[in-house]
Image: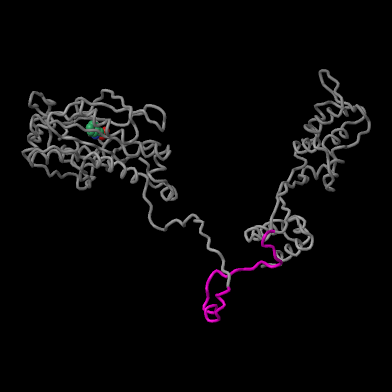
Amino acid sequence: MDDVERDVLAAIAASGTVNTGTIAARLGVDREVTVGVMKRLLAADMIASTPIDRSMLTLTDEGARAIEIGSPEARAHAAVPSEGMELATFKSTSERDVADVGFKQAMQCKWLTMVKGERPRIERAVETIVDETRETLRKVQRGEMIEQKTTEALKKRKLIKEEKWKEYELTKGAEFALERKVLPADLTKEMMNEGSWKGQEFKAYNLVPGAGAQPASGHVHPLLKVRQAFREIFFSLGFSEMPTNNFVESGFWNFDTLIQPQQHPARDAHDTFFMKTPAKMNFAPEDYVDRVRTMHEIGGGGSIGHQYAWKRAEADKNILRTHTTAVSARMLYDIAQTGFKPARLFSIDRVFRNEAVDRTHLAEFHQVEGVICDKNLTLGDLIGVLYQFFERLGMTQLRFKPAFNPYTEPSMEIFAFHPMLDKWVEVGNSGMFRPEMLEPMGLPEDVNVIAWGLSLERPTMIMYGIDNIRDLFGSKMMISSVKNNPICTI
Ligand code: PHE
């Protein structure tokens, strides 16, 4: 218990009531100190308190200056000689506050008048004036009361300001005493030895939970949180995850197996990252490579192919995969080899594109891809499964737009009504893999594959309200935003 606390208690005992502001002034301490003491005593139920709003007018620097050298309007009056002067000269030779506010106020007080003409003049309307503003400011300085209307006017002119604070009237509480008992929080060895613990009163436990400290552990990046939510949606729909741990792909698996022609612009260095070392490597079964070559060159199964000379060298080039469909192609080939069985597969991983970086594009991003391989699938199955999938993301209204992908026919862009954004947005791309792609793999003729893809970044940005992708991913992301982002709620 400190001296201020003791003095406050003594003052209440002596006169029944005490004001935190008055006692602070008497003891020569800050007002906050007596308020702090009050809070401690309130918590111990030793006093009761009633707040009182207090305020005080003080001079601003400009107000203090007006007391010293006169108000701007008085100085404006003084600046005009008895015979008057040209307005332009007055304005150009006076100090700014005199030329502006001072002039306006002096005109309002009818201390000056204006003589209109080609070169307007100002003259004194009265010879002597009383500087009321200065007088009022002096009153404020002495702490005297002034009229409410005048207070408002001077506050508006920034000559005075009002300081506000709370004071408290303190009276005795239920547990009032001249000393605050500081109760022990712990049972000590001495209390045990002496047996004093028996009559001892202890400090009560605080059972109100406070906010816990942030654990010093790692934090999950928002993209990973949303990825996990997507994985769970796929698992709940009976999908299994494809192995996507190879960022480097050959052109063969990324493009050729999808029967994307070798002269397609996407296979250009402008759009795709090519590896320097090793620049080439392609572990692909030669019989399959041959069937893919034939499909490109002359077609098969009713298709005429692309009608050009397919080059093995192009297929062998190492690149950073441009989409996860490269992995889907590998999986479908495996399914055909091991004897067809229906499959539902998904992947969520990183892909790379040689793109100009801006607020919505990075050279690397994540794709979410779903693939279903079964007999006699139709476009209706694709539409049905898309409704199932997007419903779990909270989007129940979908629209489809015909689109083009080199490896799907038909292809559809997917639009959804986004409840959070309250508008229709493009949410993905989809289609049925072409027979030209499936036949060389060795899948039975009546097997169809439906698939769809979307980015992981876009839903994450929408969900976390991020509008610049660089705030989400890469070296410019703030560590604090990794630590503080909320859990994903899809
Ligand atoms: N691979 C496509 C892309 O990169 C997405 C897609 C996947 C389209 C599956 C159709 C089917 O945009």
Residue 462 point in image, percent of width and height: 39, 36
Q: How is the image coloured?
A: one colour
Residue drawn at point x = 83 percent, y = 41 percent: 146
> Is 269 situated left or right of 201 in this image?
left
Residue drawn at point x = 37 percent, y = 39 percent: 460
Res 352 quadrant in image: top left
Residue 92 point in image, percent of width and height: 79, 31
Residue 175 lies in magenta, yes or no?
yes
User: In the image, which residues are magenta?
Assistant: 173-199
Residue 406 point in image, percent of width and height: 20, 28
Q: Is residue 384 above or below residue 204?
A: above
Residue 16 point in image, percent of width and height: 77, 59
Visible residue check, residue 306: yes
Q: Nearer the viewer, residue 207 or 107?
A: 207
Q: Nearer the viewer, residue 382 or 298?
A: 382
Count numbered badges in the picture. 0
Res 121 quadrant in image: top right
Q: Quadrant of the N terminus?
A: bottom right
Q: Quadrant of ligand 1?
A: top left
Q: Nearer the viewer, residue 460 or 178?
A: 178
Query: Of all residues shown, which one is farthest toward the front?
Result: 198
Visible residue check, residue 266: no
Query: Of all residues shown, which one is farthest toward the top?
Result: 117
> Is 46 situated left or right of 195 in this image?
right
Q: Nearer the viewer, residue 112 or 348?
A: 348
Q: Is residue 377 above or below residue 202?
A: above
Magenta segment, principal secondary structure? loop
Query: Of all residues shown, which one is farthest toward the right?
Result: 127
Residue 106 lies in magenta, yes or no?
no
